[in-house]
Image: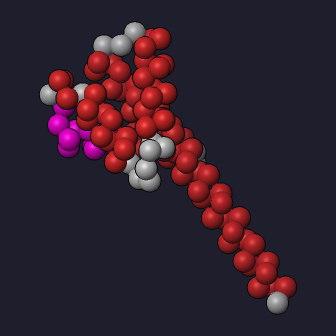
Amino acid sequence: MSSFDDREKSFEKKFAHDEELQFKVSARRNKYLGQWASQILGYDQEKETEYIQSVIKADFEEAGDEDVFRKIKTDLKDHNISDEEIRKKMDELNEKAKSEFK
């Protein structure tokens, strides 16, 4: 029974670690996404910092990435950026963020 308990605790630790890592990767991706969008929007450094925080906070509205996607899409609606471009940039920046945690 002790071996089973040890294995169960090990799985729980791995799950917690994986969840924490995914949270960090998403937050980093959202930071990069905010930087990218703020450049398109022409924000200065102070406004960019505020905007990045708003993108990161948008991710807490619901599970998954759709909340962040909707925010970026809404904010860039007057800049002729397609849904496909936004999703491609999100994927690209997610990979960049993942590589920084390996």
**Res 101 quadrant in image:** top right
For this orientation, the residue located farthest to the bottom is 1
Q: Where does the image place residue 41, in percent across and percent down from the top left?
A: 29, 18
Q: Where does the image place residue 46, in percent across and percent down from the top left?
A: 47, 11
Q: Please provide the residue range marked out in magenta.
A: 81-91
Q: Locate the N terminus and report the quarter of the image it occupies.
A: bottom right
Q: Residue at the location (66% across, 64% down)?
A: 14
Q: Residue at the location (57% across, 44% down)?
A: 24
**Left or right of 83 on screen, residue 63:** right
Which residue is at the front of the view, 98 or 54?
54
Q: Where does the image place residue 31, in percent across and percent down from the top left?
A: 47, 31
Residue 22 in view here: yes
Q: Where does the image place residue 68, in percent across and percent down from the top left?
A: 37, 40
Q: Which secondary structure type mostly characterizes the magenta part of the structure? A: helix
**Left or right of 75 on screen, residue 33:** right
For this orientation, the residue located farthest to the left is 80
**Res 82 quadrant in image:** top left
Q: Residue at the location (79% across, 78% down)?
A: 6
**Left or right of 70 on screen, residue 54:** right
**Res 36 quadrant in image:** top left
Which residue is at the front of the view, 4 or 52?
52
